[in-house]
Image: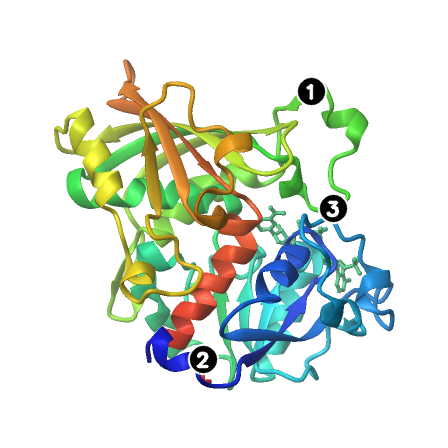
Amino acid sequence: MMGSDLHFRDKIPVAILGATGSVGQKFVELLSSHPWFEVAAVAASEKSAGKPYRQAVNWLMPSPLPEFIGNLEVQKCEPNLPCSVVFSGLDASIAGEVEAKFAQAGYIVISNSRNHRMNADVPLLIPEVNADHLELLHSQSYSKGKMVTNPNCSVIGLAMAIKPLLDKFGVESMNVVTLQAISGAGYPGVASLDILDNTIPFIGGEEQKIETEPLKILGKLSKGRIENCQLTISAQCNRVSVTDGHLECISVKLKAKASKADLIAAWKEFKGEAQALNLPTAPQFPLHYFEEEHFPQPKRHKLLEKGMAVSIGRLRECPLLDYKFVILSHNTIRGAAGGAILNAELMVAKGYIFW
Ligand code: NAP
C-alpha cells in the first residue's frame, strides 16, 4: 500500500505513552499534523493521569500545543486505550514491563526505550538501514501484538552514516566520541548548575549501547534471525551544554581501499526503503555531506530536512585508522520520536499496521 492511496481514508488512531516527557512532547508535536496518524490518547504516570494534558505537561516544544491534544485527559499506561498502535516515550525504569503488557494485549508497540531493543525477536529498526528486519515480527511470541524498537539516539545517526561505507568498502572497526545534547537526558534532566559552563564525561549506559546496538542493526537477516555484523566499536560519551542535537566524532578502519571522494559519493548516493516508499516523514536525502570545515553544528544543522537527516562533515585521513569525520543528528526527532514515526509509516506501507 503506498502513501498516495492512503490520504483518502480516515487516519489511524494512535496513543502516546510517556506523552508528558521530552520524547513524548516531540511525538505530540509531530503527530498533531501527521497525514496518516491521529492522536487518540495520551498516557503518563499516576501523577499526570486524570489531568487535562495541557495541565499535566510542561510544554517545551517550539510550536504551540495543539488545542485538541491539550484538552485530552491523560490516561494511565494501561492497555485499554482506544487504538491499536502505541508510541512509547516511557522512562526506561517502567518501559519494559508496560510495553510488554501492551504487546501482550494485542497492541503494536513502537518504542524508544532500551528495554526490548536487544531481544532476538525484536527489530531494532532504521527504515533506511534495515527495513528487512521487520520480518522478525513473524516470530514474535506476543499473542496478537507486536513490538518494534528505535535504536539509541546516538546510534541512529551513527548507523546511518556507517551503512553505505559498510556496503561499499566494508568496515573493520571504529572509534566514536560523542558530544550529546541536554535534552537527551529527558526533562528536567541534568541540573542547570551541573551542565552550564561544563561538559560531563559520562552518560550512564550510553557507551555500551553504542558499542553493541549497531552490530544488530547492521547485521544480516538469515533464516528468521539476525547474524550480528562483525565490527569492533569503541565509544566515549560526553554531555555538553547544547539543547538538541548530538555530535559524534568518528574514526573508521575500512576493509577495502577507498578515496575521500569515494566516501563522500557513498554518503551522497545513500537512500533506503523510506525514500523508495516515499514515506511522509522520510528525508529526501538521509545523509548530507558539508564541505565547510567548521560544519556540521547543532545550532545550524539539527533541523535539516525537518530534523530527519544526518549531517556529515570534516572527512579527513586518520593517522590511527583510515578516515575520521563528524556527524550530527537531532536526538529527539531523528533519534527518537521522528524515527519511531518513520518506523510506523514503514509498517503501514509493508502491511504490518492496518488502516
Ligand atoms: P522523560 O522526559 O523523563 O519522560 C519520561 C516519561 O515517562 C514521562 O511522560 C513520564 O510521565 C513517564 N513516566 C515516568 N514514570 C512513569 C510511570 N511509573 N508510569 C507511567 N509513566 C511514567 O524522558 P525522555 O527523555 O522523554 O525519554 C523517554 C524514553 O526515550 C527513555 O527510555 C529514553 O531513554 C528514550 N530516549 C530518549 C531520547 C531523548 O533524546 N530524550 C532519545 C532516544 C530515546 P510523568 O510526566 O507523568 O512523570
Asked whether residue 352 is in view, the answer is no
First in residue order: circle 1 vs circle 2: 1
The image quadrant of residue 265 is top left
- Judged left or right of residue 322, residue 73 is right
**Mark 3 vs ligand 1: CB below 8 Å:** yes
Amino acid type indicated by mark 1: Asn
> What residue is at 12 percent from the left and 28 percent from the top?
257
Amino acid type indicated by mark 2: Ile
- Give ligand 1's quarter of the image: bottom right
| Closer-to-camera residue (199/267) | 267
**SS for tag 1?**
loop
- Judged left or right of residue 205, residue 224 is left
> What residue is at 42 percent from the left and 25 percent from the top?
295
In contact (CB < 8 Å): disc 1 and disc 3? no
Spatial CA distance of label 1 from label 2 is 45 Å
Q: Which mark is on residue 187?
A: 3
- Judged left or right of residue 197, residue 193 is right
| Position above or below: 198 against 272 | above
Asked whether residue 277 is in view, the answer is yes
Q: Furthest residue to the left?
A: 257
- Counting from the top left corner in percent of width and height, residue 52 is at 84, 69
Which residue has dot 2 on it? 353
- Judged left or right of residue 164, residue 352 is right
- Considering the image in quadrants, where does the N terminus appear? bottom left
The image quadrant of residue 278 is bottom left
**Mark 1 vs ligand 1: CB below 8 Å:** no
| Closer-to-camera residue (39/202) | 39
Which residue has dot 1 on it? 198
Mark 3 burial class by Cα count in 10 Å: few <14, some 14-19, many 20+ = some
The tally of labels here is 3
